[in-house]
Image (cartoon, rainbow, N blue to C red):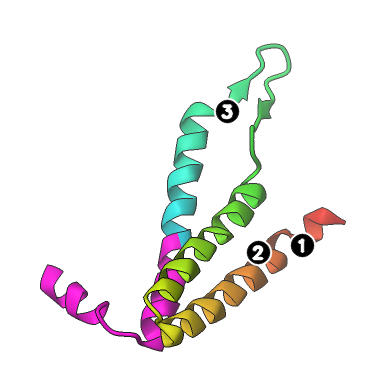
Amino acid sequence: MNNLLLKIFQHDKWLNGFISGLFVPIVIFAALLQLLESLGILTTIESGQTVHILRPRTIALIVLFANIILMNAFKKMRWNQSMRGLAVSTFICIGLWVFKYGRDLF
């Protein structure tokens, strides 16, 4: 399985950028959400309310900027097709963010 992944991601392909552009933000979002839920939720005793350090919509927005790091890595390797796939998946993620959290802004 490890050799198969290495063979797939050794080439400049549109699908490689698309998959990595969806996979990396989802994994980072899940990890940050889990970390902040275990460390960052403070409960007040009197009112029973929970206070978040960062809202999930802010975490999702920060994670979308993680694709910039991937974009820079693909640029250094001169993988233009992978950069195109990454751009498409980033726009899809931005559209999902606006669809899910856009109503909360207004």
Report helix, strand or loop for mark 3: loop
- Residue 37 location in percent, x, y? 51, 34
- Residue 57 location in percent, x, y? 66, 51
Q: Is residue 1 visible?
A: no
Q: CA distance from mark 2 to mark 1?
A: 7 Å
The quarter of the image holding the N terminus is bottom left
Asked where in the image residue 8 lies, by quadrant, the reply is bottom left
Secondary structure mostly seen in the magenta stretch: helix
The quarter of the image holding the C terminus is bottom right
The residue identified by callout 2 is 97
Does residue 9 sit above or below 31 in this rendering?
below
Looking at the rendered structure, which numbered label has been put on residue 41? 3
Q: Is residue 35 left or right of residue 5?
A: right
* Residue at 45%, 36% in the rendered image: 35
Highlighted magenta segment, given as a residue range: 1-24
Q: Amino acid at mark 2?
A: Trp
Q: Is residue 30 magenta?
A: no
Query: Which tag, 2 or 1, sits closer to the chain's start?
Result: 2
Q: Amino acid at mark 3?
A: Ile
* Residue at 41%, 66% in the rendered image: 23
Q: CA distance from mark 1 to mark 3?
A: 24 Å
Q: Is residue 19 magenta?
A: yes
The residue identified by callout 1 is 102
Asked if the residues shown at circle 2 and circle 1 are in contact, with their CB atoms under 8 angstroms apart, the answer is: yes
* Residue at 46%, 60% in the rendered image: 26
